[in-house]
């Protein structure tokens, strides 16, 4: 197992994801002799995990069961221990595509933060690319290095502990793309430009506030970036539910027992409401939006560096 | 010199188009005329320049690298404060259509024409600075023929297709495609199953993210896979070595164990040509003696024709054999039932596709289905719950907004895409044996929670 290569069976030392149910999961470090507590009971690594196929159902000591999943950057993003506010897969997806990342790409990133985006970038540029990530907080930089090692991707990433605004990314003229998620990205645009290849590349800056975006766009223009474009992306999730609505009693038109006008001639048509006149309800399937959703994460500004 | 298609995406102030040309030795794109957005030009002069170079179209239709012109910001621009006195009577521009045409015919540069328009506009200096900027931008877009040649990529092609030919890609918006690639954990070294009717755009996007490592089996309806958009990416030949295709019409037989690579009906043509080739061979063998010189010439011609026919027929047979071989390979790849992911984006109803194609996917692997409409995915979700063997089902839509960021003029852009399609994603798990096909594979606790008891009487599906 690694975050860049699928494995079939759970091995000692793997990071696996324990799935308990709807949106309830957590990562676990598989180790001989260890046990993991869950609300359904105990999981014994040696007997319940090691040697089993990923995707297996594991029964816990109290009788309930869980699924053990192979880790992916997306599952990691949902379950990693937060040291900072992180980027979620929705933003990560558009960043990856707009920066034109693919196997072999060289990417520079700052700040590393909790490593959410880092894992996704590493996965995309593997096996021949590289991620240079800069984090000015020493402990966070160390923790990131440790996690990359545990996840089997340390050969694809270099973590540097410095301030990107002062000292840049530590490399020059080699990157296909640069990503900035820092408080003052305009101070790092110059460094970003020198990190990018001479022939050109792409840059992205993520900022929660529009004022930061304005200053960053100006800086990008000053440094000769083109195709400057700002967007934001949000995910709308729908819960699939069967809904039953009551038919109101509107009384009767005449003395006879004819129905109150709701046409139920086709009760079994797939997808259309089926009226149950005895109970006075209509049932249908709906994709119901969540009550509270994420309304804003940050603005994403992309631009291109060209040779000319 | 190896033949490699020279692929170019043309960007004209906001629009992107793709043109494919084939490089044939040195005579490559000479004289190839591109007609695009009411402009026409030859691409000859572009060869040799770096991607990202911006060109101007000269009067002869030739491309010339654009010189960076310093905006004259030193002179104080005369401008008004607001539009209370500006009347739009359509008469503020003194140059007529004919005047402008005359300027264009004279070969005056676009920049000059814009300058002329400004000087001949009675209301220009009354406009606010912002309005003047907007006016200049608009005129430049119309009269300055500026072309930037960019390298194709998923970003470029998906935005292009969505803007210009959304019908061809089932209105799959580019951010939705981006979500699919990430949700599907598309990366190098995997075995992916792709089923799409998006002109090959989704396939190309998957191939780009796999970088030539791993393998892809593309499922296709009808006679063959459509890969029009795929060829626009400019992938090296090696990328196609591990790209396989398999007809949807044979999926049931493959799942049922009755699949065979032999053709289902005996094509008459084959039999006929078999017989013919044998006949022809006999003829040529019988050729040798007793022929007069004149006849000899004739028979030479005939025998050459025969040989030609024979070789054509043989070519056909070889092609058929190769096709059968590829089909067997694809079937074998699928038959292992250990694909690392499934991507579906088609005009077909997603449920039957998912229910059958998921059989080929290994446990603990992601799958993503795109549909232009929400309702079929509601049905798909329900059927998948009944089938079991999937968890973390999520029905989603992504919302995208572009912004104009200018000093004192920052706001979301005026027009926005109303919808970019819907996605259903999930993860496979080991399907338990002996399922009756109804009820969920997960114990009650794992069902979608019926949250709060609402007056609407929600029921979990």
Image (tube, coloured by chain):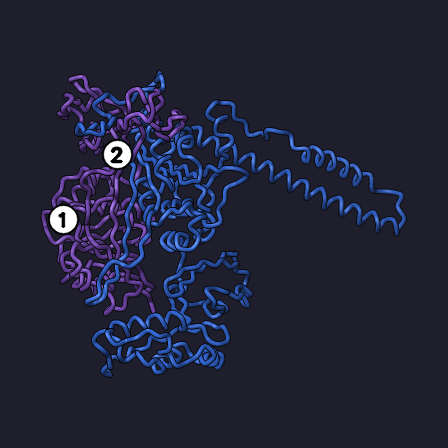
For residue A141, which numbered disc appears in the image?
A: 1
Query: Disc 1 vs disc 2: Cβ atoms closer than 8 Å?
Result: no
Chain under label 2? Answer: A
What colour denotes chain B?
Answer: blue
Q: Earlier in the sequence, mark 1 or mark 2?
A: 1
Residue B75 percent location from the top left of the image: 24, 83
Residue B166 sits above or below residue B377 on the image: below
Measure how far apart labels 1 and 2 are at the Cα level.
38 Å
Which quarter shows the C terminus of chain A?
bottom left
At x 16%, y 22%, the residue is A40
Residue A126 percent location from the top left of the image: 31, 46
For residue A239, which numbered disc appears in the image?
A: 2
Q: Is residue B157 left or right of residue B32?
A: left
**Residue A153 occupies quadrant:** top left
For the residue pair B220 and B274, the one nearer the viewer reads as B220
Helix, strand or loop at label 2? It is strand
């Amino acid at each position: 197992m690694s975050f860049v290569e699928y494995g079939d069976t759970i091995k000692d030392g793997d990071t696996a994801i324990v799935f308990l149910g709807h949106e309830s999961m957590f990562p676990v470090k598989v180790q001989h002799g260890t046990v993991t507590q869950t609300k359904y009971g105990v999981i014994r690594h040696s007997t319940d995990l090691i040697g089993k196929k990923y995707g297996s159902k594991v029964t816990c000591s109290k009788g309930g069961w869980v699924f053990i999943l192979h880790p992916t950057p997306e599952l990691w993003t949902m379950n990693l221990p937060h040291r900072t506010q992180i980027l979620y897969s929705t933003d990560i997806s558009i960043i990856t595509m707009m920066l034109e990342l693919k196997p072999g790409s060289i990417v520079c990133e700052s700040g590393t933060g909790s490593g959410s985006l880092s894992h996704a970038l590493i996965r995309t540029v593997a096996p021949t690319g590289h991620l240079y990530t800069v984090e000015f907080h020493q402990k966070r930089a160390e923790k990131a290095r440790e996690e990359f090692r545990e996840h089997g991707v340390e050969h694809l990433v270099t973590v540097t502990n410095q301030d990107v605004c002062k000292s840049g990314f530590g490399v020059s003229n080699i990157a296909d793309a640069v990503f900035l998620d820092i408080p003052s990205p305009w101070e790092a645009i110059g460094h970003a430009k020198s990190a990018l290849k001479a022939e050109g590349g792409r840059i992205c800056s993520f900022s929660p506030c529009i004022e930061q975006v304005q200053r960053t766009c100006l800086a990008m223009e000053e440094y000769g970036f083109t195709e400057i474009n700002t967007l934001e992306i949000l995910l709308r999730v729908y819960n699939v539910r069967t809904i039953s609505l009551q038919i109101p009693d509107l009384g009767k038109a005449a003395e006879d027992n004819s129905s109150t006008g709701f046409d139920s001639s086709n009760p079994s048509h797939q997808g259309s409401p089926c009226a149950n006149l005895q109970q006075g309800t209509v049932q249908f399937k709906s994709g119901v939006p969540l009550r509270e959703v994420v309304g804003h994460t940050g603005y994403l500004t992309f631009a291109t560096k060209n040779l000319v | 010199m190896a033949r490699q298609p020279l692929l170019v995406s043309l960007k004209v102030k906001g629009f992107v188009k793709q043109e494919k040309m084939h490089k044939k030795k040195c005579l490559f794109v000479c004289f190839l005329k591109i007609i695009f957005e009411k402009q026409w030009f030859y691409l000859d002069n572009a060869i040799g320049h770096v991607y990202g170079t911006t060109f101007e179209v000269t009067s002869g239709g030739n491309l010339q690298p654009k010189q960076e012109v310093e905006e004259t910001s030193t002179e104080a621009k005369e401008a008004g404060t607001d539009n209370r006195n500006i009347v739009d009577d359509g008469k503020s521009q003194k140059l007529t259509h004919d005047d402008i045409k005359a300027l264009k015919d004279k070969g005056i540069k676009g920049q000059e024409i814009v300058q002329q328009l400004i000087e001949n506009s009675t209301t220009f200096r009354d406009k606010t600075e912002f309005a003047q900027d907007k006016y200049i931008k608009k005129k430049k877009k119309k009269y300055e023929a500026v072309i930037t040649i960019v390298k194709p990529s998923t970003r470029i092609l998906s935005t292009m297709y969505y803007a210009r030919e959304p019908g061809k890609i089932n209105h799959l918006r580019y951010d939705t495609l981006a979500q699919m690639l990430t949700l599907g954990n598309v990366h190098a070294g995997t075995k992916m199953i792709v089923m799409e009717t998006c002109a090959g755009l989704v396939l190309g996007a998957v191939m780009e993210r796999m970088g030539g490592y791993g393998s892809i089996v593309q499922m296709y309806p009808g006679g063959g896979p459509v890969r029009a958009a795929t060829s626009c990416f400019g992938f090296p030949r090696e990328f196609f070595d591990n790209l396989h295709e398999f007809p949807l019409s044979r999926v049931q037989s493959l799942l049922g164990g009755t699949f065979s690579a032999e053709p289902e009906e005996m094509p008459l043509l084959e039999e006929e040509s078999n017989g013919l080739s044998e006949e022809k061979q006999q003829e040529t063998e019988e050729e040798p003696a007793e022929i007069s010189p004149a006849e000899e010439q004739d028979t030479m011609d005939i025998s050459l024709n025969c040989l030609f026919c024979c070789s054509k027929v043989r070519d056909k047979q070889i092609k058929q054999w190769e096709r059968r071989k590829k089909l067997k390979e694809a079937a074998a790849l699928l038959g292992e039932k250990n694909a690392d992911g499934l991507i579906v984006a088609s005009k077909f109803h997603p449920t039957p596709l998912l229910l059958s194609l998921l059989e080929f996917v290994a446990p603990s692997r992601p799958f993503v289905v795109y549909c232009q409409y929400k309702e079929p995915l509601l049905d798909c979700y329900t059927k998948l719950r009944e089938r079991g063997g999937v968890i973390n089902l999520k029905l989603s839509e992504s919302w995208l907004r572009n912004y104009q960021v200018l000093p004192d003029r920052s706001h979301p852009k005026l027009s926005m895409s109303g919808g970019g399609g819907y996605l259903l994603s999930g993860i496979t798990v080991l399907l338990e044996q002996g399922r009756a096909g109804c009820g969920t594979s997960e114990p009650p606790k794992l069902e979608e929670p019926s949250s709060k008891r609402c007056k609407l009487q929600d029921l979990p599906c």
